[in-house]
Image (cartoon, helix red, strand yellow):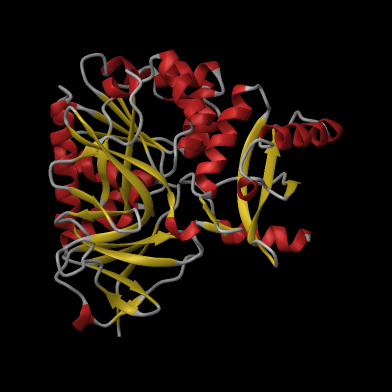
Amino acid sequence: MTEVIPFLCDSTNVDEKFDDLNKLLEKGAWVQLIAPQEKRIFIESSCLPAGPGIVVSSGGSSGRRHHCLHPCNHLDQSAFATGKWLEEQGIDPHSSFVFNPLPMHHLSGLMPWWRSRSWGAEHVWIKPSLIHEPNLLFDSFRQLFQEMSTRSTLLSLVPTQLHRLMSKKEGVEWLKIFDVIWVGGSALSSCLARQAISEGIRLAPCYGATETAAMITALSPNEFLAGLGGCGGPLHDVELSLGDNGALKVRTPRLAVALFSDDGLVSLRDKEGWWSSSDWAELSSCRSGIRLSVLGRMDLAVHSGGETVFPEELEAKLLSEAIGSGFPIEALLFLPVQDAEWGQRLVALVRFSNETTSPSSSLLLQSLKELVSTWLPAERPVQWHICPPLAPNQLGKWERALWEAWLQAKN
């Protein structure tokens, strides 16, 4: 067995770590990006495609993880496609500043650096902790901001980070600096979108996956500010379609060459070159072609009393209504539980703001129940729990197995 070279990714000396990673790749190695305490993987050398390349973990939201193998030319292709999209928006990627507050062991944190590397642009690492303290962001980059007056500024965020920034005046003002703010990884709530539009913040909701070497669709900031929804149209090297079950299918030359899991190395593509995602989606016609809307994960669908419901869609619906009504709600998660009569029912976990007192929390839970009283019976949670530690991971994704364990321990 020959191991892929493990490369530990943490938030210390990040610029140096990117330099070290670059040196390994220049030697033609396959490199596994690992977070602290993540396990190394071993693949027989005879099974490895030609390097250099990156092995990066994917999954987790549904409880199962695997690793994607991407030769470096896939990441180059992804950066090229994103650069072409920027040029269509009137932005020169080569003279841009690329700001990055995402962890480098995920593809979403690797690609901002890779794009800057491919374009010859400036990569600016942001300590994720600064997202919690937007008043320090201006001070940390004050000198750099003075240099940016004639250059485009690009930023990648997940909705959780966007929410934290937009909850404070300093964060809103900081976001207004950027020409493009790609937001992906999970659904952007309609309430947060409306707030961003009202502030003139140039969001570009997008869709991508580890399997596709990151972003494959993006909505332009101008379209977003005009009130269009969804994740935009496909980048120039991407084809989209829907499977018979409504799942999104993707065909692009930069699909991962293989997945490595407990079953060994397996291909993503079917005989016609399509990869079937686990995302339930809609494709609609628009002036520029087609536009993608992602409705939820197929593998998280809940079958309740003969109805199929999608927890992510319901979470977004309730969050939008609750925040719009002034509820001090910070996080919300719907989980399925087995039910002898219904098959499955939903349970709601809720975290209110730290300032909310215990008596107020009980009253707020009752008010949330009233908000869903007109929903279909299969959509209404049968239990509600206040969960003080409830939060998504660094990429804004829910590690549902973790919170299912919390729920089981509570019950």
- In the image, taking residue 372 as reference, residue 13 lies left or right, namely left
Residue 178 place in picture, x, y as percent: 33, 22
Task: Point out the residue furthest to the front here.
Answer: 306
* The quadrant where residue 207 appears: top left
- Asked whether residue 60 appears in the rendered view, the answer is no
Residue 324 place in picture, x, y as percent: 59, 23
Q: Quadrant of the N terminus?
A: bottom left
Please name the residue shown 50% across and 43% down the image: 313
In depth, the one of 37 and 282 nearer the eye is 282
Please name the residue shown 29% across and 60% down the image: 276
Residue 354 place in picture, x, y as percent: 73, 33
Please name the residue shown 21% across and 63% down the image: 53
Q: Quadrant of the C terminus?
A: bottom right
- In the image, taking residue 83 as reference, residue 9 lies left or right, namely right
Please name the residue shown 51% across and 37% down the image: 160
Residue 179 place in picture, x, y as percent: 29, 21
In depth, the one of 312 and 122 nearer the eye is 312
Q: Is residue 74 above or below residue 52?
A: above
- Asked whether residue 305 appears in the rendered view, the answer is yes
* The quadrant where residue 364 appears: top right
Q: Is residue 251 above or below residue 115?
A: below
Q: Is residue 39 above or below residue 128?
A: below
